[in-house]
Image (cartoon, coloured by chain):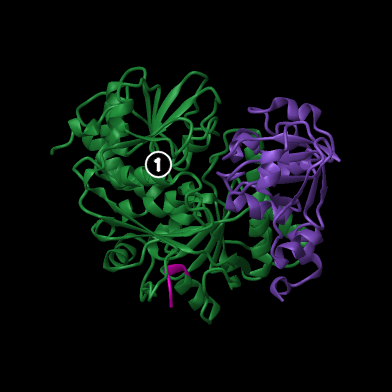
């Protein structure tokens, strides 16, 4: 009964749960990566109790993998030693944690997951509850198998209308971020619904829960439907039947109606993700690095639209253009379909699969005075290296168009109307 | 008693401690670089018992615990802010860094003011201008964790079920 989050929590708790209630729930899976696992191990060892169920634990190497420096190598060795010692076998190093969890079939409607990463909200695209927690709580969950949650109130964002050609889900979500602000949904569950969402393929839907983190949300949810089921069964290892979670007689704290029809390409400008402008307001800004990738926009279809624009063209000589597929599976498909060849012919660099330049550890850092245009979800000062660098966010299409000109460019000049 | 250090609204975790320093988990090491891009004098001159005063949405951004650990490692007694980002709030409770919510205090306190905080009652005293403020009460289970000095300490001697009983 109630909103999507109330439905998910009620089913898990085995009793009706309403917004505002504190619950202690079994978690289906506990995720952490190379950056957040060391502190989880420390907390776990201090508690001094054994792992409750190692099948709940999933560990990924994606943030600084393969290790770009000695400290990262030492940390990763310690994690590997721990996994061997504890018999943890669900260990992946084939891409960004969130993408790999989806591909490997861990994300199903109705599941409750916690991740040592703030973009664990991503799983909500499939009607699963996913949220980011600190590493200490990851270690706690290894021992206890549970986590406490305050059931959030829900903001419903109803998206209607048809987006103009050349305007993508990333543009719509940036528009929402600009409108709501970085704390516009703090502690809330945000449901994304409406005819625009219904007609979106999964790879575009994922962006909304993924970036719900940036407006402060505890989770971002989309009710599963036939599109979700088809995607799970053909693109992932997940197999039904699935819990088709639906809001039942929900009470929403706030309902926001947005008609996407008149939205134009958007850019989140340095230094904040909610500092969003229409692209034409920043068109012509010179760019030193274009980065296409991440858990937000590193999927096959994102690479495909970038390749469509870059085919037969060259990136600007002084604009290094880094394309980093979000997973090995995506990289393989991109190779088979000739996209990697297109990127190489255009003068791009293919990054090592994973988070890459997004967190400023490796794969394309920015020096002082440099400006990047990326498909990331976050552009805090210093995120990609120098605090004297600037980061602008946009869609993969806009990133590709920008790489060719060497300045921020509207992608629609390359796309058929 | 401690000196107040004031920060802006929407202070993010990369401003608390840049990602490139998150390769250590040692609190004293992290403390060396806390606020290094935005208030470098803090790490050099902070004294144990000093108080962090933040605005709205304090601690937004990443779930990395390095941010609250760095603040705790620097010897700060607690944080007083108008409001907190979700994960940061939770992380502070879990590692035993006391946090209070008090918009009145944030509006009235100036950088450098001499601040006294009674964590048990949530009463804040500004010895520089003589004003007193009352912070919001925290939920019971949060107090249980805070009283134990963090969730790890709590779990050494309790079952997780006891949090909500």
For the residue carrying disc 1, how many other residues have a C-alpha within 10 Å: few (<14), some (14-19), or many (20+)? many
Left or right position of A122 against B115: left
Label 1, secondary structure: give it: helix
Q: Colour of chain B?
A: purple
According to the colouring, which chain is green? Answer: A
Say which of A190 and A236 sits in front.
Answer: A190
Residue A227 horizontal/vertical position (percent): 27, 64
Please give the name of the residue rendered at 65% of the width and 37% of the height, measured from the top-left corner.
Answer: B16
Tag 1 subunit: A
Residue B134 visible from this viewpoint: yes
The quarter of the picture where the N terminus of chain B appears is: top right
Residue A81 on the magenta segment: no
Residue B8 horizontal/vertical position (percent): 61, 35
Please give the name of the residue rendered at 61% of the width and 44% of the height, measured from the top-left corner.
Answer: B59
Name the quadrant containing residue B47. Answer: top right
Which SS does the magenta portion mostly show?
A: loop
Compared with residue B41, is residue A334 higher up or lower down, i.e. above or below?
A: below
Residue B113 horizontal/vertical position (percent): 79, 34
Please give the name of the residue rendered at 33% of the width and 26% of the height, measured from the top-left corner.
Answer: A282
Look at mark 1 in the image and give the residue it sits on: A178
Compared with residue B112, is residue A213 higher up or lower down, i.e. above or below?
A: below
Residue A134 horizontal/vertical position (percent): 63, 53
Left or right position of A415 against A307: left
Say which of A43 and A337 sits in front.
Answer: A43
Name the quadrant containing residue A202. Answer: bottom left
The magenta segment is A1-5
């Amino acid at each position: 009964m109630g909103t999507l989050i109330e439905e998910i929590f009620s089913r898990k708790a085995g009793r009706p749960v309403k917004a505002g209630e504190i619950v202690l729930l079994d978690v289906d899976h506990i995720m952490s990566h190379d950056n957040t696992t060391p502190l989880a191990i420390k907390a776990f060892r201090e508690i001094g109790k054994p792992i409750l169920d190692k099948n709940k634990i999933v560990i990924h190497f994606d943030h600084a993998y393969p290790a770009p420096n000695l400290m990262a190598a030492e940390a990763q060795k310690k994690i590997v030693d721990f996994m061997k010692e504890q018999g943890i076998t669900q260990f992946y190093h084939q891409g960004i944690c969130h993408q790999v969890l989806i591909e490997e079939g861990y994300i199903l409607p109705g599941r409750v997951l916690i991740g040592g990463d703030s973009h664990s909200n991503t799983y909500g695209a499939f009607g699963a509850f996913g949220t980011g927690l600190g590493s200490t709580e990851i270690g706690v969950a290894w021992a206890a198998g549970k986590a406490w949650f305050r059931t959030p109130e829900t903001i419903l964002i109803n998206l209607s209308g048809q987006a103009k050609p050349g305007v993508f889900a990333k543009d719509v979500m940036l528009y929402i971020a600009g409108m709501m602000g970085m704390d516009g949904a703090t502690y809330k569950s945000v449901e994304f619904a409406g005819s625009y969402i219904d007609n979106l393929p999964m790879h575009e839907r994922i962006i909304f829960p993924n970036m719900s983190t940036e407006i402060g949300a505890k989770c971002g949810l989309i009710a599963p439907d036939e599109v979700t089921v088809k995607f799970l069964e053909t693109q992932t290892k997940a197999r039904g039947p699935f819990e088709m979670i639906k809001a039942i007689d929900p009470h929403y704290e706030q309902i926001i109606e947005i008609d996407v029809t008149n939205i134009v390409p958007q850019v989140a400008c340095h230094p904040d993700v909610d500092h969003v402008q229409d692209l034409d307001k920043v068109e012509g800004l010179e760019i030193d690095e274009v980065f296409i990738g991440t858990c937000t926009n590193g999927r096959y279809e994102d690479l495909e639209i970038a390749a469509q624009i870059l085919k037969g063209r060259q990136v600007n000589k002084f604009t290094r253009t880094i394309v980093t597929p979000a997973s090995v599976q995506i990289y393989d498909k991109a190779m088979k379909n000739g996209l990697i060849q297109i990127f190489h012919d255009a003068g791009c660099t293919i990054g090592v699969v994973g988070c890459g330049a997004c967190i400023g550890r490796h794969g394309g850092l920015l020096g002082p005075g440099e400006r990047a245009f990326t498909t990331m979800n976050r552009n805090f000062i210093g995120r990609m290296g120098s605090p004297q660098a600037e980061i602008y966010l946009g869609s993969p299409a806009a990133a590709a168009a920008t790489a060719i000109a060497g300045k921020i460019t509207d992608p629609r000049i390359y796309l058929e109307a | 008693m401690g000196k107040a250090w004031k920060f802006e609204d929407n202070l993010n975790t990369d401003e608390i401690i840049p990602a490139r320093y998150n390769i250590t988990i040692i609190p004293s090491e992290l403390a060396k670089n806390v606020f290094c891009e935005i208030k470098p004098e803090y790490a050099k001159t902070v004294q144990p018992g000093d108080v962090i005063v933040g605005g709205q949405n304090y601690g937004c951004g990443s779930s990395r615990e390095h941010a609250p650990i760095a603040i705790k490692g620097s010897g700060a007694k607690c944080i007083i802010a108008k409001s907190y980002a979700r994960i940061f709030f939770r992380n502070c409770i879990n590692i035993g860094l006391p946090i209070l919510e008090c918009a009145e205090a944030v509006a009235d306190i100036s950088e450098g003011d001499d601040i006294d905080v009674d964590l048990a009652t949530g009463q804040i005293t500004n010895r520089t201008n003589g004003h007193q403020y009352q912070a919001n009460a925290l939920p019971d289970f949060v107090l249980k964790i805070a009283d134990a000095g963090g969730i790890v300490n709590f779990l050494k001697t309790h079952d997780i079920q006891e949090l909500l009983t």
